[in-house]
Image (spheres, helix red, strand yellow):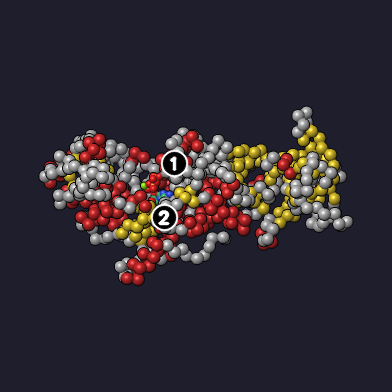
Amino acid sequence: MSESEARPTNFIRQIIDADLASGKHTSVHTRFPPEPNGYLHIGHAKSICLNFGIAQDYQGQCNLRFDDTNPEKEDIEYVESIKNDVNWLGFEWSGEICYSSNYFDKLYGFAIELINKGLAYIDELSPEQMREYRGTLTEPGKHSPYRDRSVEENLALFDKMKNGEVEEGKMCLRAKIDMASPFMVMRDPVIYRVRFATHHQTGDKWCIYPMYDFTHCISDALEGITHSICTLEFMDNRRLYDWVLDNITIDCQPRQYEFSRLNLEYTVMSKRKLNQLVTDNLVSGWDDPRMPTISGLRRRGFTSASIREFCKRIGVTKQDNTIEMGSLESCIRDDLNENAPRAMAVLDPVKVVIENFDGEAEILNVANHPNKPEMGTREVPFTRELYIEREDFREEANKKYKRLVLGKEVRLRGAYVIKAERIEKDEEGNITTIFCTYDNETLGQNPTDGRKVKGVIHWVSAEAGIPAEIRLYDRLFTVPNPGAADDFVSVINPESLTIKQGVVEPSLADAEAEKAFQFERMGYFCADSKESSKEKLVFNRTVGLRDTWAKIGD
Ligand code: ATP
Ligand code: MG
């Protein structure tokens, strides 16, 4: 395992250390609160590693809470995928799964409490008017004409809203705070609205739904969360978070802390945009191996250890930042270089005939890992007809080209030295066959007469090899920050997927889905979890052997 052992330190852990040292808290309770309106992505992994990681390291607890107050956009499919992804990343939530919708009765009660205290009112401004009355960053807002209704009137109207007697958009419940506040979120924020939507957890029980800012802090308090960690865009909302908890009767005061979200070059992280890629069929689904989703990365061959390691390496700060794709890839490369067994596959085959080899296949034993004898060996058949990579042969080449050249020698990985004697071409001039001879004294040793053979290429037996579809992936977008483009769809990379019809060595016939191999010289690959079968093998390239991102844009 290449995951580093040391515990991370960051400003949030320093706050926790101080809170434990001062006795403010005796234990730590965090939560991860996704909205089930899409699949989790690598940005969520940062938040998951932070929240669950803290619970692990401090022997505390971390809840998984679905923040489900938007029934129209949410779906049970997302709930299931999120649970699955959190577990796959290696984390286990404390106790039962939580849903904000579990607290709808209590939230309703707290709304009544605010009304009774004169701190909330039913507004009837239209959404447009409300926007107009809100003011701007430089100008204070105006009071709604409905702001000073009596408590009785507010209670009666809220009851009508709850009973389905009010149309969507005609009335809402607003907190009565300060229309002149420099923080826009404090200008009488809406806390309840009417939505005639069936909810994936509560069905048709409710037709009023609480807003995020009202729900989140109360859910945290009800669950006894000590440190409520979210991303920087919620900084101003912290005022409202505290205001709500200060003004209702609840005996827990969690504190909100913000950190900067993860941005990754050449991809988008907004769920709205990822959803559009899926619904417009611009990718094959949320788990398309080109997607920055946890399920996409997993299908592509990323290990959960490599994603945890990535989150550790990027750290947690308050600075806005964008991480290079190369950083994520170096984590998976470090892991697989250590741990992935080697195998051979030819992606663009050209046939080689060994003219002086006769008879049955010779079974060679080849090491699964060059530096790890404990990983054992596998049987690789050597036969008269083989495939090599088309780009590994040239009719003529200078000394820098250390592969097979007409009239010269090269070593076949794990096998013999061969010499290219002559070639055959089709009518278009494409090479169809390379006729070679082999030196049967060179298995595992150099030629005895002192001839130097420098190059080593990979190969697969033509008779025993198995055809396989091999999918090569490139960045999904052509620009580093596609989210900033006017139309992010217009900067999709048309060459993000290349399909090759290759051949793989027979030991790969039973390759387990998502289990990584290093295909010698070609990169790291795994069998596709959805589309690979015994009848048709399909491999995804997880990542190449070397960082190619650095070159982009040069
Ligand atoms: P979007 O804005 O695309 O809908 P979101 O942030 O609203 O995404 P949630 O499901 O609400 O998505 O996110 C759950 C948790 O994950 C939140 O605490 C959020 O702050 C965190 N999170 C989301 N995106 C990132 C990111 N890119 N980096 C770090 N944390 C993130
Ligand atoms: Mg959100």
Residue 379 visible in the shown view: yes
**Residue 482 appears left or right of 202:** right
Sequence-wise first label, 1 or 2: 2
Residue at image location 51% in from the left, 41% down from the top: 479
Q: Within the image, what quadrant is residue 460 found in?
A: top right
Q: Element type at marker 1? A: helix
The picture quadrant where one finds residue 123 is top left
The dot on residue 319 is: 2
The kind of secondary structure element at disc 2 is loop
Judging by the rendered image, the residue that carries numbered circle 1 is 484
Q: Position of residue 508 (x, y in %)?
A: 66, 47
The amino acid type, in three-letter code, at marker 1 is Ala
For the residues labelled 1 and 2, the Cα–Cα distance comes to 19 Å
Q: Which residue is drawn at 24% across and 53% down?
A: 244
Counting other residues with Cα less than 10 Å from the Cα at mark 2, is it few (<14), some (14-19), or many (20 or more)?
A: few
Kindly identify the residue that appears in the image at 62 percent across and 58 percent down.
338
Residue 253 occupies quadrant: bottom left
Tell me residue 344's x, y (percent): 69, 48
Q: In this figure, what is the number of numbered marks?
A: 2
**Kind of residue at badge 2:** Gln
Residue that extends furthest to the right in the rendered view of this protein: 449
For residue 158, side relative to residue 327 (left or right):
left
In depth, the one of 97 and 488 nearer the eye is 488
For residue 70, above or below residue 226:
above
Comparing 43 with 493, the one in front is 493
**Is residue 86 visible in this depiction of the protein?**
no
